[in-house]
Image: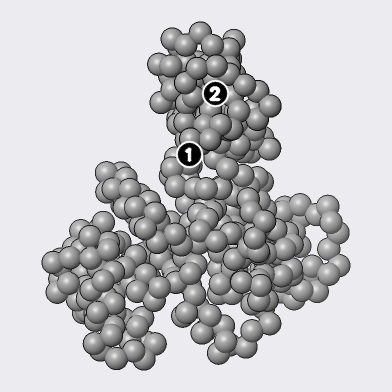
Amino acid sequence: MSTERPVISCKNVWKLFGANPERYLAKMSSDMSFDDMREDGYIAGVKDVSLDVFKGEMLVIMGLSGSGKSTLVRCFSRLHEITGGTIEVDGQDIMSLAEKDLIDLRRSKMGMVFQSFGLLPHRSVLDNVAFPLEMRGQDKHTRRARALEVIKLVGLEGREDYFPRELSGGQQQRVGIARSLAIEPDIWFLDEPFSALDPLIRREMQDEFLRLQQLLNKTIVFITHDFDEALRLADRIAIMKDGAVEQCDTPDQIVLHPATEYVRKFTEDIDKARVVHAGVLAKPDQTGKGDPVDAGMTVHKLARILVNDKRDFIPVSRDGVSIGAMSRADALDILLGAE
């Protein structure tokens, strides 16, 4: 993904639930399955996970209920103490931090949004958003100014004096997002923030979230069980099963090249033409004649060109610079299905 140092780096991380988990992990054989551990009285919430998250990236962690995705993110912020492995945030081993330093790290660098909005019912929108700044000890004028700024950012201007009960579900979620943004976090953790919303509001919130990310360029770890949502939002997707990461890659690569049978089942009903981009199909050593297509266009958006064009190889460019050419036959296979 990048040659720069990751913002979050976890190496061989385990989180076991059970009696004396550290002792069990130390004597555990490398080939033990999830079911083997369960028979011994242990649950692997996270199983030997190694992942890096880079600055400005949106990593979506997905899986079915009980796959370990929420447990892993709670390990990233040390809301869970890990059983084994290491987790670094900005190069600092968070497992070595004293409690005061850990609290300071969370307050200064991390924002969190959960499925349950967690709003204070007796406080207005303004006071809910300003609450984490109040906990920081900031003066009333400063926290009010910052709260008004992020309320406007999430599209709730004019509702500062409303109470949560007077807001729709989507508006309440916006308050939760504004509250987490008020502290200006570098890292943003979102645990299924839109899953309680109806489909139309959920789509609206996804659009709003993508807009915010374009403006703010946060480092984001986003949890969902919805593969369509993951495909729409992610720079990379990590798919989890039984505490382990089955595959971590870009949406294009996951739908084109699923690493396991489990991942393949996730992707089998997906319209690949709406996910795969021309830039992924472009071969750097290949050339084509005529007008190029943009690397960011999906095969679906290129459908008319692909059907009517007679070129075997179509040039592809990114930001006006050639990056190679894609095979029209390969693109048509994705659009129409391989023969």
Residue 208 vs 9, above or below: the answer is above
Report the quarter where the C terminus lies: top right
Say what secondary structure mark 2 lies in.
strand
- Is disc 2 surrounded by few (<14), some (14 to 19) or many (20+) residues within 10 Å? many
Quarter of the image where one finds residue 178: bottom left
Query: For the residues marked 2 and 1, what is the alpha-carbon distance in whole angstroms?
Result: 13 Å
Residue drawn 17% across and 65% down? 157
The residue closer to the viewer here, 268 or 24, is: 268
Q: Amino acid at mark 2?
A: Pro
Label total for image: 2
Pinpoint residue 108: horizontal percent, then vertical percent: 47, 79
Residue drawn 24% across and 79% down? 145
Looking at the image, can residue 250 be seen? yes
Residue drawn 29% across and 91% down? 139
Residue drawn 47% across and 15% down? 306
The residue closer to the viewer here, 201 or 18, is: 201
Instruction: Answer left or right for 275 relative to 76.
Output: left
The residue closer to the viewer here, 128 or 57, is: 57
Residue 260 vs 222, above or below: the answer is above
Pinpoint residue 127: horizontal percent, then vertical percent: 24, 79
Instruction: Answer left or right for 147 relative to 304.
Output: left
Say what secondary structure mark 1 lies in.
loop
Looking at the image, can residue 65 be seen? no
Residue matched to label 1: 319
Q: Amino acid at mark 1?
A: Asp
Report the disc number at residue 315: 2
Pinpoint residue 300: horizontal percent, then vertical percent: 43, 25
Quarter of the image where one finds residue 48: bottom right
